[in-house]
Image (cartoon, rainbow, N blue to C red):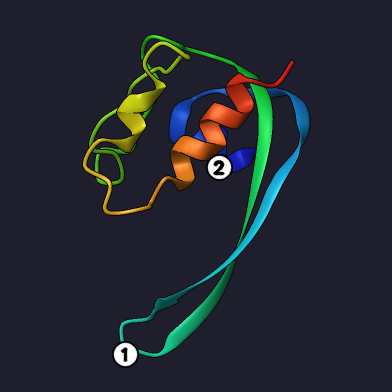
Amino acid sequence: MRELEEETGWTVDRVLGLRRVVDWESRDSDGKVVLKREFVVAVTVSGPWEEPRLEESKVSEARWFSLDNVEMLNENRPGTDTYVYDLVLEELHRP
């Protein structure tokens, strides 16, 4: 919650639930494999919707998505890399 507020200016109103736990690997600056675990949590938020406080060094673009334009998340994605698209589509179909 702290990180969300720092990076966007938004505050968490409600935690909707844990959606996924993903284990993955990356490499550190020495080339050593580092195991990582990511928790995907759905929340509702409030804050400055039209002007979120984004860290320019970490964000290349920001967009809002709906069922009408969610396919844009697959633009410029290599092969079968649909991870973010799948997460967003799943959440948009949730009652």
Mark seen at residue 30:
1
What's under tag 1, amino acid-wise? Asp
Mark seen at residue 3:
2
Quick check: 77 left or right of 32?
A: left
Instruction: Answer above or below: position of 16 versus 45.
Output: below
Residue sticking out furthest to the front: 79
The tag earlier along the polypeptide, 1 or 2, is: 2
Quadrant position of the C terminus in the picture: top right
What's under tag 2, amino acid-wise? Glu
Q: Residues within 10 Å of mark 2 (few under 14, many from 20)?
A: few
Q: Point out the frontmost of discs 1 and 2.
A: 1
Snapshot quadrant of residue 42: top right
- The structure residue drawn at horizontal position 41% and vertical position 22%, both measured from the top left corner, is 70
- The structure residue drawn at horizontal position 36% and vertical position 26%, both measured from the top left corner, is 71
Quick check: 40 left or right of 6?
A: right
Instruction: Answer above or below: position of 77 versus 93.
Output: below
Quadrant position of the N terminus in the picture: top right
**Helix or strand or loop: what does disc 2 sit on?**
helix
List x then y, in percent, for residue 82: 42, 45
Snapshot quadrant of residue 51: top left
